[in-house]
Amino acid sequence: MLKWIIRVLPFFYMALIWILSGLPHNAVVELPDSAVDRFFKESLHLVEFGILYVLLVLAGLTAGKLTPSANFLLAAFACFYGILDEIHQSFVPYRSATLIDAVKDITGVLVCWYFISRALFHGRFKKLASILSFFKALFS
């Protein structure tokens, strides 16, 4: 049962991203200081699509061996979804979509991809590699 929850979790997360990006930027939270609010929300671009990529990797690990090419495809998919989300936001009143936002989305994915690919396929980042190996063994 847990295996299937982990497999569908990325899709629920993608739906959450889509729904939230369809709302005005202050619909969920607005911090009292507008500069802090803007900084916080701009920083989330780096995080939210990195999280999507990590969820995709975890789902992939429940399905068996994750190859370097499959890992790359998962990262590319997360990047594509970030771009698609920016396009979606461009049609939402009171939202903006910029090239720099898409770059931040992709950067978040690429940072996570670097660490995960080095841990899984290049023997680096031993603690991360052991966590991913444990996760893989748990569901194989």
Image (cartoon, rainbow, N blue to C red):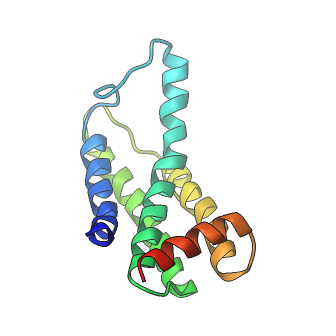
- Asked where in the image residue 133 lies, by quadrant, the reply is bottom right
Percent across and percent down for residue 25 are 34, 31
Camera sees residue 76: no
Q: Which residue is at the front of the view, 38 or 60?
A: 60
- Asked where in the image residue 97 lies, by quadrant, the reply is top left
Percent across and percent down for residue 36 are 54, 21
| Residue in the image at 47% along x and 33% along y | 41
Camera sees residue 118: yes
Percent across and percent down for residue 75 are 50, 70
Q: Which residue is at the front of the view, 53 or 85?
A: 53
| Residue in the image at 49% along x and 17% along y | 34
Q: Which residue is at the front of the view, 78 or 90?
A: 78
Percent across and percent down for residue 94 are 30, 30
Instruction: Count up the numbered dots.
Output: 0
The N terminus lies in quadrant? bottom left
* Residue 117, above or below 104: below
| Residue in the image at 45% along x and 69% along y | 58
The C terminus lies in quadrant? bottom left
- Asked where in the image residue 80 lies, by quadrant, the reply is bottom left
Determine whether, in the image, residue 1 is placed left or right of residue 64. left
Residue found at the far front of this picture: 138
